[in-house]
Amino acid sequence: MGLAEERIQPEEIVNTSKTVLPFGMRDKFGYLFGDFGNDFFFILVSSYLMVYYTDILHVSAAAVGVLFAVARIWDAFADVIWGRFIDSRKTTKHGKFIPWIFRMSFPLVISGVLMFVQIPGVSDGFNVAFAFAMYILWGTLYATVNIPYGSMASVITDNPVERTSLSTWRTMGASMAALIINVGGPLILFQDNVASANRFLLAAIIFGILSLACYMACVTLSTERIVQAEKVNERGDFKKTVKGLGKNKPLLWLLVTSVIFMLTMLMIGSVNVYLFKNYFGSTVALSIVGFIQTAVVFIAMPFIKPAVARFGKKEVGSVGLLLASVSYLLLYALPDVSVTLFLVLSGVGMFGMQTFNLIIWAFVTDVIDYHEYLTNLREDGTVYSIYSFARKIGQAAAAGVAGFAITAVGYDATVGTQPQDVLDGLYGLATLIPGVLFLLGFIALAIFYPLNKKRTDNLTAYLSEKREAK
């Protein structure tokens, strides 16, 4: 059914503030700082926590994989619960989402530091249990900050081009955190190629302070402009919400693509630590990979807005995923790849990966709009939490698959030099698997995701007209 055929009257969206600044650079920097703060710990955890558990606490990679998978599944449900809770709250004079980012950032950062604390004078088993408990607590608290932060994009502006800018600046914030952690992390965390417990704790404290400062900048610089009109004695119809989510094909196929993308990206991050530490024997090269991963974001960034304006988000994102797939499959197919060639070709793959990643959050605002179109309900927190749920499932799968796969190829942390068959297995995990998964992501987005440029523009115009027809 076309947008013009279904006569739905969306709930009125109004701006109740008398002195709201127009959308501009202040909002972009504010949104940048949000994911800058998020990813200081998110990337540290996704890239290095498994090494902390296996090489410092001496937990098997398979056991860590189980922990990560269970924790991420729990986090996925926590996201949905928190999203529904946020949607049930009234908008304050500071906004609906900003106050929660401020309140919950403090316990989130504290729990992040505690993940890397080893208590002296207790058994190794106690330290393992404490580390596991802090990891689960951190993941739960992460939802209380990330759900309102991600939902906030759709109320900062309703302009599709401006939303694409927010997505780009958000990814740039994450990339800046990645630059610091992936480049500086190996130099801080490892001493003579060996993971150091004291260095991990030092890094957590440093990144925790930086993370909190970024959250405060996000709260200070961001402005919520689109405020849903309060209706007396009216609450969201949960059955209607669920029915709308089930009919929201753009959301469903975005979920599929996002699960595949998160699984692939996080698996690359986890396996690369072992690959460069063991296969190439150089954690310095791992720092170079971290630099490349961030550099390609800044290379791609100037092209994203004009490319999306001309071709559309779906079209640009699909090309990025296809480029990533071809690059990693080529790395697997070529014989005797040197560390230099690996860096070059993986850099091309990362360019494709980041091209999609730069606009991924703009996809989310589109599916939130489509939910409003279908249901006559504006439920930013709920829809965003469903999307976050899918990402957490991808994270859970990545953690479980990476842990079991590393164990399956025979990796043994107690052995100084890994056998050649183990090294070859690690190389396959770092190249073939990402190549295949990126290809699946391309198929899901290019063929099945229905909101191409024309349909997205029509959706935006349709909702805008309805909101103005008071």
Image: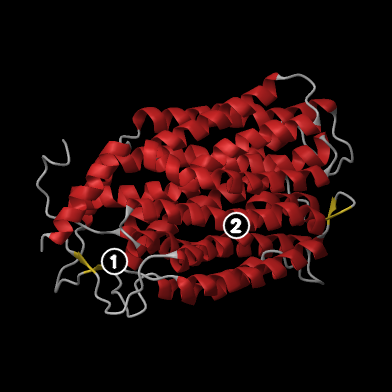
Residue 65 point in image, percent of width and height: 63, 45
Return the residue at label 2.
42
Residue 295 point in image, percent of width and height: 65, 47
Task: Tell me if residue 161 comes above or below residue 138 in the rendering.
Answer: above
Task: Tell me if residue 263 comes above or below residue 12 in the rendering.
Answer: above
Q: Residues within 10 Å of mark 1 (few under 14, many from 20)?
A: some
Residue 219 point in image, percent of width and height: 47, 73
Q: Amino acid at mark 2?
A: Phe
- Residue at position x 34%, y 51% from top? 160
Q: Going from the N terminus, do you reach mark 1 or mark 2 first?
A: 2
Return the residue at label 1.
226
SS type, badge 2: helix
- 352 on left or right of 331: left
- 158 on left or right of 31: left
Q: Is residue 451 something that shows in the picture? A: no
Label pair 1/2, CB-CB below 8 angstroms: no
Q: Amino acid at mark 1?
A: Ile
